[in-house]
Image (cartoon, grey):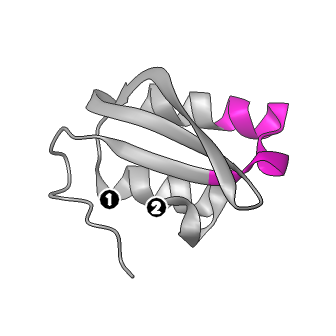
Amino acid sequence: MVPELGQAGVAGSILISIPDTRATPPTIRALREMFLRHKGDGEVRLRLVRGETGRIYELPYAVQTTGDFFGELKSLLGPGCLV
């Protein structure tokens, strides 16, 4: 299944999903820095997954959803991070 990401650069909501064990301080810092580099209007939500369940958090950042942003995100968290 391929997530519907919409048009690059168009404001929208993105949901990033990672196992809760990957939510380490260095990873969260890297995400924050990436969000600040790609400021825009797109709402960001983070789902931390543990087993079959997950918690979704609305983050206080808005990003520009460009190919560069998605490439950097997948490089940091892996190709399965976008829902």
Q: Quadrant of residue 31?
A: top right
Magenta segment boundaries in residue numbering: 18-30
Residue behind mark 1:
67
Compute the Cα span from label 2 to label 1.
Answer: 6 Å
Figure quadrant of the C terminus = bottom left
Q: Is residue 10 left or right of residue 71?
A: left
Q: Is residue 52 magenta?
A: no
Secondary structure beneath dot 2 equals helix
Q: Residue shown at 59%/29% (left/top)?
A: 33
- Residue 37 in the image: state x and y as whole percent: 45, 31
Q: Is residue 53 left or right of residue 4?
A: right
Residue behind mark 2:
71
Q: Residue shown at 83%/38% (left/top)?
A: 24
Q: Residue shown at 32%/59% (left/top)?
A: 67
Q: Is residue 26 magenta?
A: yes
Residue 21 versus residue 56: which sits nearer the camera?
A: 56
